[in-house]
């Protein structure tokens, strides 16, 4: 087990871990409590998958069959067509891909300005940038809707995509922290050689920043895939719906078919779980970094 | 520098400053999107004080904030504390606690509707195992808000990570010193661990409060604000006014009151934090 842990956690999780109590009893108690808590957190997912593999008749019985047999895999193709899963996925990608491009474009530039160019008022602006994270979206929801409505953009993907080309405080912060760790001497040397600021950004800083660019890409994919409110407000036609929005159609009847709904849920969750498991470290470092500074 | 940060400056002006001012202006008007805004002075704000649905929404939101935020911080701290005990499988466990928050909120909401189902749901099935007949959760005005608080505790993974990072930064020497002084495990937690993680507590409280004030998608999908408006939260009522009844002026005045409330809470938290938050050596 130790080997696997070493491979997957790296330096972050292996930092100084404090042994609180030398006593074996305390240790065993903590271990047991940790396992119970984890089981409680995993149980909803187990319940979801278990329900998704039942015949409709087995869904509504009490006490429930925890592990249905035989497993009803056909629920999944049924759920796939019960709501237009494929088009919802394509729609979501049509928003996610341009959004990621927009975020990478706007936030790397801005973060570079905040991290590596000294200028009057820079830190004040950066503080303002950070404080926008505190502003409730509900406060700007109405006027932003009016703005996009006047532009004639409601009912299209544009309101969901275009703002990403104009920066987002969270990613700017994440990228700035990374850019700060790159030695200034690299930039200075390039300047001496006559390289422009844009050249330094594109040819030195960006190539060194691949890990954090990957982190930002994953976060933004996850954000778009999971976003509920913005699509709810801006998308008016059902054929434009995203996965997160379209999922609720499983509830659109007096008595939902829970086995289908749970199969749909599982399929909607799977991509983000795969992305997360593959890139755990990037996610966790990103979250942790925000907290330390915050 | 300005050239580089210009995307953000445009975004800041276009999506924060201008909308905030626009929203402030709308809050003094009657505006239904079809006719131009009509100035009505403080009418919207005065009407809000007499709107029983609004006051009900304020009460529901305060209930949700008061219960879900402290319970969430406490749960996250306990989980992080357990994870920090050099458990085997720690990476796997940490992942289990974190995954719920990367899942789309609509999927979470649908899943928990099924968990809370009064006849066949997971929760009441588990309660039946120990001989308790569970309530109808989301269907009951008494239990609908507690249900959403319970679900919120499933979403504390972000705070768990923050606490875990903070716990890992507590210098080993402090524990050793406390042990030499004869402090038992409980006293070490109380006098060493908790003071050292107060910055993480502040951060979790702050982000938790701001998020809880704006809670929306869970109730919108799971209960639609019901039963009998027991889960009609602030932003739910704001959304209904804005996007269902197209009372943009009224919704904007609600938005500004919310903004004010968030600012006040943030300032109070920071002001009092000097008294209870301890920043270690590096500040």
Image (spheres, coloured by chain):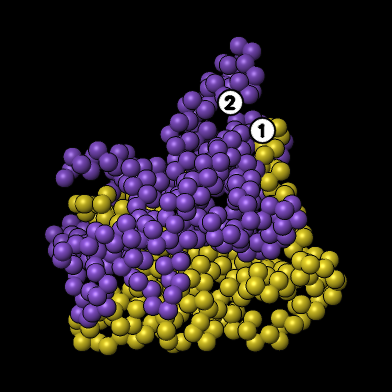
Chain colours: A purple, B yellow
Q: Position of residue A174 (x, y in %)?
A: 51, 42
Q: Secondary structure at mark 1?
A: helix
Q: Picture coordinates of residue A228 (x, y %)?
A: 52, 60
Q: Subunit of mark 2?
A: A
Q: Element at badge 2?
A: helix
- Contact between marks 2 and 1 (CB within 8 A): the answer is yes
Say whether residue B192 is visible: no
Chain letter behind tag 1: B
Q: Is residue B234 visible?
A: yes
**Residue at (56%, 43%) from the top-left corner?**
A99
- Compare residues A234 and A75 and report the one nearer the observer: A75
Up/down of A120 relative to B256, above or below = above
Quarter residue B57 falls in: bottom right
Q: Residue at x 72, y 49 (%)?
A: B14
**Residue B240 picture location, percent across and down:** 63, 73
The residue under label 2 is A201
Q: Is residue B37 left or right of residue A268?
A: right
**B32 left or right of B86?**
right
Q: Residues within 10 Å of mark 1 (few under 14, many from 20)?
A: many
């Amino acid at each position: 087990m130790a080997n696997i842990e070493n491979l997957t956690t790296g330096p972050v999780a292996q930092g100084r871990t404090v042994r609180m109590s030398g006593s074996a009893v305390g240790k065993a108690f903590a271990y047991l409590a940790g396992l119970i808590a984890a089981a409680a957190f995993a149980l909803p997912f187990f319940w979801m998958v278990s329900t998704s593999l039942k015949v409709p008749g087995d869904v509504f019985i009490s006490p429930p069959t925890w592990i249905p047999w035989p497993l009803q895999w056909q629920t999944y193709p049924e759920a796939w067509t019960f709501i237009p899963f494929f088009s919802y996925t394509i729609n979501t990608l049509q928003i996610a891909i341009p959004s990621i491009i927009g975020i990478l474009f706007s936030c790397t530039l801005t973060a570079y300005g905040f991290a590596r160019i000294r200028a009057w008022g820079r830190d004040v602006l950066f503080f303002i940038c950070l404080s926008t994270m505190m502003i409730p979206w509900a406060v700007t929801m109405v006027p932003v809707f009016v703005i996009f409505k006047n532009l004639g953009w409601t009912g299209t993907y544009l309101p969901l995509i275009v703002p990403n080309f104009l920066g987002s405080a969270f990613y700017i912060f994440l990228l700035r922290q990374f850019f700060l760790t790159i030695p200034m001497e690299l930039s200075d040397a390039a300047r001496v050689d006559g390289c422009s600021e844009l050249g330094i950004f594109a040819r030195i800083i960006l190539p060194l920043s691949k890990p954090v660019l990957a982190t930002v890409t994953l976060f933004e994919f996850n954000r778009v895939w999971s976003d509920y409110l913005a699509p709810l407000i801006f998308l008016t036609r059902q054929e434009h719906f995203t996965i997160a929005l379209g999922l609720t159609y499983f509830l659109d009847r007096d008595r939902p078919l829970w086995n289908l709904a749970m199969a749909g849920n599982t399929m909607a969750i799977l991509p983000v779980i795969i992305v997360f498991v593959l890139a755990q470290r990037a996610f966790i470092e990103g979250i942790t970094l925000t907290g330390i500074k915050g | 520098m300005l050239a580089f940060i210009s995307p953000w400056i445009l975004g800041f002006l276009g999506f924060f400053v201008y909308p905030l001012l626009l929203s402030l202006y709308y809050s003094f008007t009657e505006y239904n999107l079809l006719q131009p805004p009509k100035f009505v002075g403080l009418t919207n704000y005065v009407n809000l004080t007499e709107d029983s649905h609004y006051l009900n929404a304020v009460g529901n939101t305060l209930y949700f904030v008061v219960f879900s935020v402290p319970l969430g911080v406490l749960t996250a701290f306990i989980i992080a504390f357990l994870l920090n005990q050099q458990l085997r499988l720690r990476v796997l466990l940490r992942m289990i606690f974190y995954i719920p928050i990367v899942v789309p909120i609509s999927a979470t909401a649908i899943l928990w509707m099924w968990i809370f189902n009064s006849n066949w749901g997971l929760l009441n099935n588990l309660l039946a195992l120990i001989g308790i007949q569970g309530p109808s959760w989301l269907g009951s005005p008494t239990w609908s808000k507690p249900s959403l608080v319970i679900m919120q505790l499933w979403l504390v993974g972000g705070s768990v990570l923050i606490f875990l990072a903070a716990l890992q930064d507590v210098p080993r020497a402090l524990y050793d010193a406390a042990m030499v002084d004869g402090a038992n495990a409980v006293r070490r937690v109380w006098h060493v661990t908790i003071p050292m993680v107060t910055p993480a507590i502040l951060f979790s409280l702050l982000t938790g409060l701001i998020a809880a004030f704006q809670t929306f998608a869970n109730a919108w999908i799971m209960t639609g604000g019901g039963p009998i408006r027991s889960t009609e939260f602030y932003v739910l009522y704001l959304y209904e006014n804005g996007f269902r009844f197209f009372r943009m002026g009224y919704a904007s005045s609600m938005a500004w009151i919310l903004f004010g409330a968030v600012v006040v809470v943030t300032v109070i938290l920071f002001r009092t934090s000097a008294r209870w938050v301890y920043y270690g050596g590096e500040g």
